[in-house]
Image: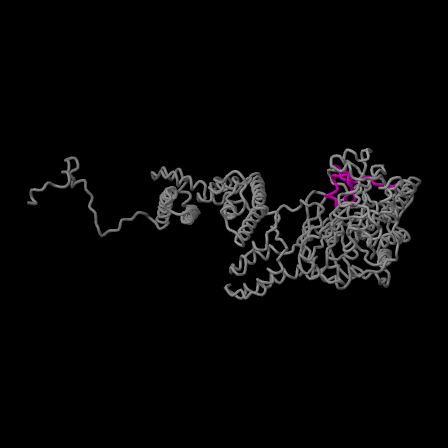
Amino acid sequence: MYAQRPLSYAPTPYSYTPNPALSATINLDEEVKLASSSAERDLHESLAEIYSIIVTLDGLEKAYIKDVVTEAEYTETCTRLLKQYKSSLGDEAVAAAFVDLETFKRTWGLECPRATERLRIGLPATVEQASHGAPSGNAGPTTGGPVGGALGSLILTATENFITFLDALKLNMVSKDALHPLLSEVIQSVNKVTDGDFENRGKIIQWLITLNQMRATEELSEEQARELAFDIEQAYQGFKSTADLDEPLHVLDLPQIYSKPSGTDLLRALDLLAVKPRGFSTSAGQGAVKSRTVDPSGVTRYLTSIVSSSLSWLDTDELREAIWDTAAARLSERAGRTAMPAMSRVFTIPTSSDEELTLTLHEPSLTADNLGMKTWVSSYLLSRRLHNILDVTPPLVPSSSTTPKSDRTLRALELGAGTGLVGLSFAALRGSSATIHLTDLPDIVPNLAHNVSLNVELLTRTDAAVTTGVLDWSVAPSPPPTREEQYDLILAADPLYSPKHPKWLVETVGHWLSRGLDARVVVEMPLREAYLPQVQEFRQRMQQLGLAVVEEGEEVGYDDWEGADGGALESSKMVIGLLAITAIPTVTGVAMGVSEQRKANERKMDARRMARFNIDIETSGETQEEDEIRGKRIVLRDNKVYLDDPLPANRKHPSHTAESFYIDYPELEETKHLKRGLGLVTTISDNPPMLNWIYADKETHELKYGNRSQSVQHVVGPWDWADEETTITLEGKSAFMAVQEEDWSWAVYFDRDGDELEWVLEEEGKLDNPFAPIKLKRTMVPQVPQVEQSNKNDNS
């Protein structure tokens, strides 16, 4: 039966009949070699792996589109395949044989369009689509995202990734190998926080594609690197606005102990809670990248919970100890500046070539009798101005020795050097053309020497010569220094903290200053109210020593004290710095004599203008309103100027009695052309002592008080006096008005338009409020003997 069945295949045509003469003999026991060497075999295997990755990736893309795999499975598998693809092409021989993706596809007959697009982008579709598929409106950070402590950790991670990437660019890491992984981490961490769109988010993807198409060792050009830095910085700012990064995190957004977070998450959170040293800059906008802040409410309890926890779920004792130590440090930082641990701070000092020098200074834990361990704002102001003083024409300070000797190298001395910021800045700026000796008391000098060693690389690069030593102003040198031992230039910043200091400081200057006519003393002093008498005494004693002021000016800085929670004080502590350069006067003619007399007269006028006064009012007494406010005094509360009883006990509302004086208003670069002259400074707090500017609001004409950033766009001057230095004027007018507010208190306005505020009060709906014209009168504050304060070491 089987013999009758037809064959299951067609008979072979004659043309395909094997020809024994043409057939090869195959030995089935012999190995068929596909490569002539192991290197060739490895190459073929790598190319085969790439082939299989492309085919698999194309299949994965189809499965994702058909919803056969979950997003998590797709993301994990796609990420792994992309890494394998990049790893395979990391070998130079494989990359050379591969050529490029299109060539490889043509060679091996591959289509795989979906895999081609995915390899071009270099990211899973879930990551890419989060950047392009979101709605155009800004979505909050919790849109489809985590909540509570998880959100805080994710935002922190994303912020750190942005900062890490921008820092890598600053360090000139511009190769694909360096940047692509970092930028991938940025977009993936951002996607975990929010799927909302924000400015320049798409730029991150575009740059990822650009980097992905580069060879592993290929580098961005200088122009590309600048463009990339700009785009990512803009993306970071957009992410901050979307995720409300300028709004502080709540403590509950941090990893909570009950959830048993990882050691890494806890250390990140503790780093976020670090109380960083505040800068002295008057510009709020300085500092390109800011870390996220945390609302101080509940932080102490949070830190205590970490310190008291056993952290038993963590793997090692070392990790637990690190977390406990860090949490304890965060607690001590919140106990005030004196409880803070030692810290290192970085300062940038400008040069005449528009470059910046970077100095690192160590500040030990602060103690009440050694405030020389802290870097004070006057040191910072003088250090940043040094390049102008040193390089100006004609010269303000000598550039070489002021006495005839073989070695013409300038010798400089810093008195009360503290952490050494001024002296080290001078040394780096002057280089080999000068030597400088930094001095202070015995307890301060070891840290001073340590700071010199911290900056040895900068000092070596600039050929600077720096020494340190002890110099006690209260002890006269014995024997007196010789002419060769004296110094051509003496520097001092913030040197007056005791009634004894003017005498000691001037005597020390007398001992150590060279007698050459070009010798100079450069002093920067903060005009703190409590020490104005010491400043005046210092001036007088320097004049008696035979030194005259050849140049002086004022500048504004802000000291860096924090509140107990590590935040800034409610009002910045404004410090007005007086920079004085003095020299031995030589009157060589009538013109110079007249100039010196003019300067002396100006200094006397400045001294009178800086005398402190209360502001009382004067009325004609013709109306009921004028009778009601007669005898009132200017007081300050809630950022506005009011009238109230001179005695605080008789006031309806708690307020601060203004004590004022005149001083030039420190204009910003963009407002210097206004030349608004004298400003009116007022105390706003006695403990701590703080100053602000009184100004008239340009819209409402109300008198208010605030710091420079709050006042600069309003009417800040010129303030002056009239009627034998008694009546206060603004813009040459003594026209002020008292207007009764809704709470029955009397606010003070400036009648700038001369219409008795008719237009302004109508705009504010106060036209029916009682008002009265007033004049502001200076009542000098009685001078009381200064009690020596122990805020700072007697010679810091």
Q: Is residue 204 left or right of residue 612?
A: left
Q: Is residue 703 left or right of residue 33?
A: right
The answer to whether residue 17 of the structure is visible from this angle is yes
Query: What is the quadrant of the N terminus in the image?
Result: top left
Q: Residue at x 63, y 56 (%)?
A: 297
Q: Nearer the viewer, residue 147 or 427?
A: 147
Give coordinates of residue 163: x percent, y percent: 58, 48
Q: Residue at x 84, y 60 (%)?
A: 788
Q: Nearer the viewer, residue 756 or 262?
A: 756
Q: Is residue 599 left or right of residue 575?
A: right
Q: Nearer the viewer, residue 739 or 303?
A: 739
Query: What is the quadrant of the C terminus in the image?
Result: bottom right
Colour theme: one colour
Examine the structure image and report whether residue 714 is included in the region drawn in magenta.
yes
- Asked which quadrant contains residue 733, the reply is top right
- Asked which quadrant contains residue 254, the reply is bottom right
Examine the structure image and report whether residue 427 is included in the region drawn in magenta.
no
Residue span colored magenta: 693-721
Give coordinates of residue 238: x percent, y percent: 57, 42
Q: Nearer the viewer, residue 403 or 416?
A: 416
Give coordinates of residue 716: x percent, y percent: 78, 40
Q: Residue furthest right?
A: 590
Give coordinates of residue 13: x percent, y percent: 15, 36
The answer to whether residue 91 of the structure is visible from this angle is no
